[in-house]
Image (cartoon, rainbow, N blue to C red):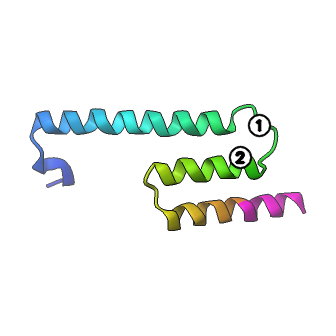
Amino acid sequence: MGLFDIFSKGKKETLDKGLEKTKESFFSKLNRAIVGKSKVDDEVLDNLEEILITSDVGVDTTLKIIDRIEIALHAINM
């Protein structure tokens, strides 16, 4: 028995449509934040942080993601 087996077919379809909209919105925001940028600067990181938090990723997870990006950028720029 899968996690979503508790939903009727109609409810599952509604859930799938809602999740698809969420996914499209998240990736659309992410795309706008990074497309055309030649470098990852504080503005890009701030925009990414805002997108993650407003997408319910969670503050702790968002901060970990941002920290890992900053560590990777620092390693690349050394």
In depth, the one of 40 and 59 nearer the eye is 59
- Mark 1 or mark 2, which is nearer the start of the sequence? 1
Vertical order, 71 against 25 (above or below): below
Vertical order, 51 against 37 (above or below): below
Q: What is the secondary structure assignment of the residue under circle 1? A: loop
Instruction: Check the picture and name the quadrant holding the C terminus.
Output: bottom right
Instruction: Check the picture and name the quadrant holding the N terminus.
Output: bottom left
Going by the numbered disc 2, the residue's amino acid type is Val
Q: Gap in Å between the C-alphas at discs 2 and 1?
A: 8 Å
The x, y position of residue 62, in whole percent, is 55, 60
Instruction: Name the residue at 77% across, 37% down.
Output: 37
The x, y position of residue 25, in whole percent, is 46, 35
Q: Is residue 13 left or right of residue 9?
A: right
Q: Is residue 76 left or right of residue 51?
A: right
For the magenta stretch, what is the residue range?
A: 70-78
Vertical order, 63 against 42 (above or below): below
The x, y position of residue 60, in whole percent, is 51, 68
Give the residue pinned by disc 2.
Answer: 44
Q: What is the secondary structure assignment of the residue under circle 2? A: helix
Magenta stretch: includes residue 45: no
Going by the numbered disc 1, the residue's amino acid type is Lys
Report which quarter residue 31 is drawn in. top right
Q: Is residue 31 left or right of residue 27?
A: right
Report which quarter residue 17 is drawn in. top left
Give the residue pinned by disc 1.
Answer: 37
- Prevailing secondary structure of the magenta residues: helix
In depth, the one of 47 and 69 nearer the eye is 47
The single residue placed furthest to the right in the displayed view is 78
